[in-house]
Amino acid sequence: MRAITAQTAVLGIFGDPVGHSLSPVMHNGWIADHDLDAVYVAFPLKSEDPVGAFRALKGMKLKGANITVPHKEAAAEAADISEGAVANVWRWEADGTVAAFNTDGVGFVDALTEAAPDWRARVGETLILGSGGAAHGVAQALAGQTHLAIANRTFQRAEKLATALPRAHAESWHDLERLFAGADLIVQTTTLGMSGTASPHWPVERCKPGAIVVDIVYRPLHTPLLKAAKAQGLTAVDGLGMLIHQGARAFKLWFDIEPDTKLARRRLLAALGEHE
């Protein structure tokens, strides 16, 4: 690893919490692979005015940043140029302005295609659990390719997301048994089950035999939802895939380099004390 100097480019991840994040392991590994004079760190950001906080952060003139819960909407609003209303990537431009991107959706599709190459032929109905920043990215990436049912603990948030997308509708969180039974693809995008937080009983026993179940939580890697899916013999996709592929897209935006995603997975599994 290079010595850090006053010329070293700084990148990082902003969120609350970020202590669980594996992004520093992933990006610093890629930085070392390509012998770049850069470093990637985690920045906890707790603020009652996140838009104002991100506007102030623009003056730091970093090279790039990732944004995670609960700040993705604030990051999009605070940027000078944004692809949409939700952002998980910032890039500082040569003129000092900040451009915002969302690599969650394309990263999710990359990961899903890697884990289940035939998913497009198998999926007609998709259930998305949650309506936060990650859910926005996933829903937008899948919009038009499948019917989308979006369920959130606050129905109005699910409705807001669904009305902005084609072939999408909001559903009540209280109807999960029916929704699990009708879905070909289930995507869990909330923080339920993350780092020891409570996880509800997911009605996986109601799923179709060929259903694909994805949980974007990666700490723990084997969430209660994925354990239940595997016990049912379903295709279960862990959260590392989306983390890695959205990160690879971000790395390309910052450095114009396509990093090694398979090497990243080996590193992250080692960091979690897991193996394939």
Image (cartoon, rainbow, N blue to C red):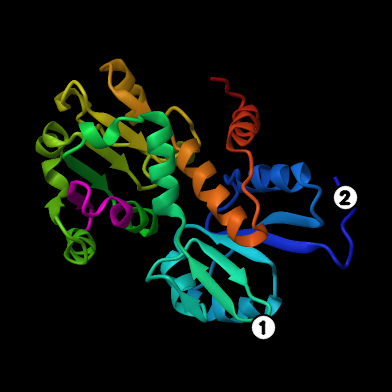
| Residue plotted at (82% across, 62% down) | 8
Horizontal side, residue 261 vs residue 199: left or right: right
- On residue 2, the disc is 2
Image x and y of residue 252, in percent:
60, 55
Q: Residues within 10 Å of mark 1 (few under 14, many from 20)?
A: few
Quadrant location of residue 154? bottom left
Compared with 86, 77 (above or below) is: below
Q: Is residue 49 visible?
A: no
* Magenta highlight range: 139-154
Q: Amino acid at mark 1?
A: Asp
Quadrant location of residue 119? top left
| Residue plotted at (48% across, 37% down) | 241
- On residue 232, the disc is none
Q: Quadrant of the N terminus?
A: top right
Horizontal side, residue 174 vs residue 19: left or right: left
Quadrant location of residue 166? bottom left
Q: Amino acid at mark 2?
A: Arg
Q: Indicate which disc, 1 or 2, sits on the residue closer to the N terminus.
A: 2
Q: Does 229 appear in magenta? A: no
Is label 1 in contact with label 2 (beta carbons under 8 Å)?
no
- On residue 95, the disc is 1
Q: Nearer the viewer, residue 241 or 128?
A: 241
Q: Marks 1/2: CA distance?
A: 27 Å
| Residue plotted at (46% across, 37% down) | 196
